Image: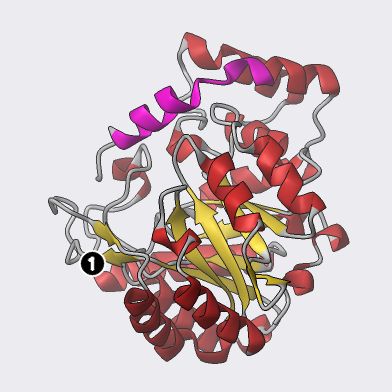
Amino acid sequence: MSLERLNPAASSIRRFGLGLAAVGRPGYINLGRDADLPADRSVDVLRTRTHKVLDAAYDRGMRYVDSARSYGRAEEFLADWLRTRPDAQHVVIGSKWGYTYTADWRTDAEVHEVKDHSAATYERQLAETRALLSTRLDLYQIHSVTPGSPALTDPALHKRLAALAAEGVTIGLSTSGPTQAEAIRAALTITVDGEPLFSSVQATYNLLEPSAGEALAEAHAAGRTVLVKEAMANGRLADRHATGPDTAALREIAQEAGASCDAVALAAVAARPWADVVLSGAATVEQLTSNLAAADLRLEPDQLELLATLTEPAEAYWAQRSRLAWT
């Protein structure tokens, strides 16, 4: 099923999607989780929380939901919600394979997820995803591709992915790390039987880490759907954390606009003409409401120029991200 169903031009809200990384499992690296989630993070509690955020997102007009095999039980929670919302037939569902969740529903696990981009992992995880989401799966992405990933050079895997595309599922990839641009450009060159393999790209892009911007613009110009993740820099650009001198420009623009820092951060990303869908990683309905104020926020060129001063070297940004604790 084509991602064209998203039709982001139909509504400013359609430019935003909901990611389930923060609610599908008890532990994640986003800042402030002790305030966002209750002490009781049992399966049933997080299932209920996920459904509340999904309800709010749908009721506000959002029509894209992003999950992954490694997001704990996010696919399961999403599948449960879809069964209770027969009116949600037009929601576009994306998921990812390539990481296996290993934390056993604990926040203190030594290893929370294990990466493997082999064809065997693809076959196993596709079967797991389909067992939950069945024909509702619209987009299947390789999770966190880097330039050295075998997913970029494995022709047998490419043929398997092309076979899934022939069944109507859009094939995409997400990227991570300071060399995202290299991975994106490599992916754009991959073909199977003369046809481009990847129809979408999801990448980290935010005010602190915009290094993939040119490559994402190239992907968009080449006809790929571009989805942006971590536009809030794992919470670093939220009001309660954007308090230091490095984010003074963000606070200044937020005050000028009469908006929250998170709304300004998301609006700055949505201002990029190549950004088709910008993901909110909200863990609460209140966060989602604040995030979606970005849909009605139009930043002036001079404001965007000032916000560009927040940029960090990519290597430094990713080094700091790697130090974030799972809580």
* Residue 89 appears in the rendering: yes
11 and 140: which is toward the camera = 140
Magenta region: 308-322
The percent coordinates of residue 239 (x first, y second) are: 51, 28
Residue 62: image x %, image y %? 68, 63
Asked whether 48 or 125 is in front, the reply is: 125
Quick one: which residue is furthest to the top in this view? 245
- Give x and y (percent) for residue 58: 64, 68
Name the amino acid type tagged 1. Ser
Q: Is residue 154 above or below residue 210?
A: below
> Is 315 colored magenta in this rendering?
yes
Residue 111 lies, in percent from the top left, at 17, 54
Q: Main secondary structure of the magenta part?
A: helix
Where's the N terminus, which quadrant?
A: bottom right
Image point (67%, 84%), residue name? 89
Image point (49%, 9%), residue name: 245
| Residue 229 visible from this viewpoint | no
The correct choice, above or below, for 136 with respect to 59 in the image is below
Q: Residue at x 52, y 56 (%)?
A: 174
Q: Residues within 10 Å of mark 1 (few under 14, many from 20)?
A: few
Viewer-side residue, 172 vs 4: 172
- Left or right, 272 with respect to 157, comes to right
Residue shown at the point (81%, 16%) measured from the top left: 302
Task: Say whether residue 195 is magenta.
Answer: no
Q: Quadrant of the C terminus?
A: top left
Side (left or right) of 326 relative to 197: left
Disc 1: which residue = 42
Element at label 1: loop
